[in-house]
Image (cartoon, rainbow, N blue to C red):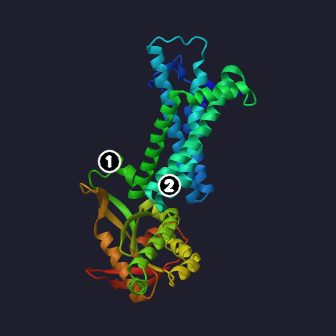
Amino acid sequence: MLSIQGSTAFFMRFLNIRDLSGWRFPVPVFWFQEGRFHNPWLISILVYTRLITPAMNTLISHNLRSQLVKIAWITLAWTLISVFQFLIGYQALIETNCDLSGRDPWIYFYGSVVTGVSAGIIGGYGVVSLWEKWLRSKSYGWTLISIVISFTIIYVIVSVVTGFYLDYSETGNTPLHIDAWIGVYHHFVSPNHWLTYTGWLFVVLGTLAFLQINDKYGPGTFLALIKGRYFHPRREQRIFMFLDLRSSTTIAESLQEEKYFEFLKDVFKHATLPILEARGEIYQYVGDEIVISWPARKGLHNANCVACYFKVQQVLNEKSDYYQQHYGVQPHFKAGLHFGFVMAGEIGLVKRDIAFSGDVLNTTSRIQEKCNELGVNILISQYLVDKLESVSNSYNPKKIGDMMLRGKQQQVSLFTV
């Protein structure tokens, strides 16, 4: 069996990590011995990002994968916060010359890891499965109270687990021993315990705020803003789809304003998951239209950009009973797709966002307008068809013909599938 030193060296070579000797922490002895890296926890994190995450991409659905990845990152972040709390506290004890004889710092270090991991897994599940959904479907006041109550329950569970671990590490008492319960009780009534509770409550609320902001801008967009990727305009190759609701004027007249708005909310909600499964980025909602974008590589892979339309329509068809019962109509979309270069960059001072500009968007909109005239549900430009044929045989495009689009001076060859 490999030693810690041997396995660490192996994984560093396997993960293409050359040198970590320059890293410094408040308590170096926990991480280094004789200039060598000896932290199996961080190695596990690196293995996860290189091995486990790619394997997950091929075995589970996009929705479940997205939830598991969120839980994993929450667990990682909260574990690092817990470890950081321990390191700062331990460093403070050293600097004040406190007598730590007879106390093994490793016990408390691993205790902080147990706290972070258990809180991340349980709390991460709560964030992804309950609290995010509450924020999307309930009032903020009701949601905030519910989050505080459920967080308190989770915090008590995590504290009990950590308390039993620390008591067992120090005394060997199991949860079946009365002294173990007494130790957990004293841990609960200490002022420091409730200061920690308040701190972790803010961590949870901060996590939820980050996820809500990320949803507001769209997956990946918020991080791009933080990184400053689009602070200066940049030229990108992108695929665009204009997904427009058929017979929207007729439906709006029959449903009236308020019910039509609820209808659009349901349609857009049900369309979101298949769009994300096709790796699409929702760029804009324009009335009854959804503008979807893909970086060239993601959109061409497995013909995601074309599959997106059929996935959306499939979901809406599966919910036909719901729409007939609530609105008396069945939603159908028509779509236009095009490919080319656009300029991408941040715009706005108060409501900052990432915007795309270029002829590609105008052309895509005009292509979508031709669907009614030509009696088809989806139209694709020759430029995109050529790219799709070079990477995928999933669909057999049929040429409609060379069409003059409104506002354009040259004809565009259009295909349908």
- The amino acid type found where label 2 is placed reads Glu
x then y, percent, for residue 47: 58, 39
Name the residue beneath numbered marker 2.
132
x then y, percent, for residue 225: 34, 50
x then y, percent, for residue 250: 40, 87
Nearer to me, 181 or 121: 181
x then y, percent, for residue 180: 69, 26
Left or right placement of residue 137 versus residue 343 in this view: right
Nearer to me, 139 or 237: 139
Left or right placement of residue 399 versus residue 58 in this view: left
- Is any part of residue 326 visible from this angle? yes
Nearer to me, 362 or 157: 157
Question: In the rendered image of this protein, does residue 233 appear above or below residue 14?
Answer: below
Q: Residue at x 50, y 20 (%)?
A: 90
- The amino acid type found where label 1 is placed reads Gly
Q: Residue at x 46, y 76 (%)?
A: 263
Name the residue beneath numbered marker 1.
228
